[in-house]
Amino acid sequence: MRDDWRQQREKGNPFVLALLSWVALNLGRGAIFVMLCPIVFYYFLFVGRARRASRQFLARALQRPPHWWDIYRHLLTFAVVSMDRILFLAGREKKFQLEIHGGELFTYYRDKGCVLLAAHFGSFDAMRVMGVREQALPVRILLDIQHNPNALTLIQRLDPQLAQGVIDARTPGPALALLLSECIARGEMVGIMADRGGSGERTVLQNFFGEPAPFPVGCWQLASVLQAPVIACFGVYHGGNRYALHFELITERLGSGRRDRTEAIAQGMNTYCQRLEHHARQHPLNWFNFYDFWQHDSTGDH
């Protein structure tokens, strides 16, 4: 059976997630880390899919066979960043050291609206601090609510204001384009994950770590229709309480008309994938796609 991320149910018992949330908010990161170590070791031993996916990616990124300790640290990094999300959503960002690169883009594009492209790499919630807390910029998130019910519940409980701005990624195409166009017109930032395609979404193969991998084209088509600037976002976890936030302009506009949009999208995707690979090579433990990322989807272009 193919190891498709869409076939993987969102992990996490609601009661356990609620308990961990309480520990993080009331006892702190030290207590939650002590709890995570044995939990992650259990997953390391008994969840073969995640272990195999980690080994596959780390072999590419490290350019050597990974040790068991590398894989365990990879899974533990994911768990720590996931728990830090609770603190970021609850407005506890002062507990972290945030190093910001490219923050001037938020000043330049204030009130202009743009598309923020993120990936399942590091922390998107840490990056929101720059826009929402520091610059008071409205950020809307495009989320597959059906596939991520626990994520939405967490956002609703800890950051109701952000929850009100969540946009369902399964909104029909024309209605979604209209809704996002209104967001851009109001000068809002629209955050979209650009490394995984939705159900039935067309993908395009891009060179990634030396081998073709399918990347979704839908977010790029939306950005081209919106005629909005595209900014890549990478929130890299550096261990302890340290994050480095990287904001990089991919393009001011994806083509000026229908004729050159296809070429502009291709160039934008290529640039984005190169930057994602750059950061993933430098900080491989931040890569959180625990499935066969290089599988070729039947909906993609081959």
Image (cartoon, rainbow, N blue to C red):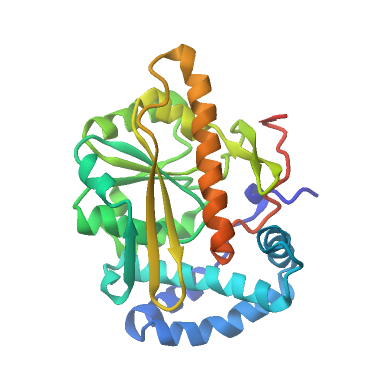
* As drawn, 256 above or below 300: above
Q: Residue at x 48, y 55 (%)?
A: 149
Quadrant of residue 115 in the image? top left
Residue 105 placed where, x, y %? 28, 45
Q: Nearer the viewer, residue 237 or 197?
A: 237
Q: Residue at x 57, y 40 (%)?
A: 197
Residue 203 placed where, x, y %? 62, 33
Quadrant of residue 66 in the image? bottom right
- Residue 301 is at least partly visible in this image: yes
Q: How many marks?
A: 0
- Residue 43 is at least partly visible in this image: no
Residue 227 placed where, x, y %? 35, 25
Q: Along the horizontal axis of the image, is 111 left or right of 255?
A: left
- In the picture, the quarter occupied by the C terminus is top right
Residue 101 placed where, x, y %? 34, 56
Q: Residue at x 47, y 67 (%)?
A: 82
Q: Nearer the viewer, residue 90 or 148?
A: 90
Q: Nearer the viewer, residue 6 or 117?
A: 117
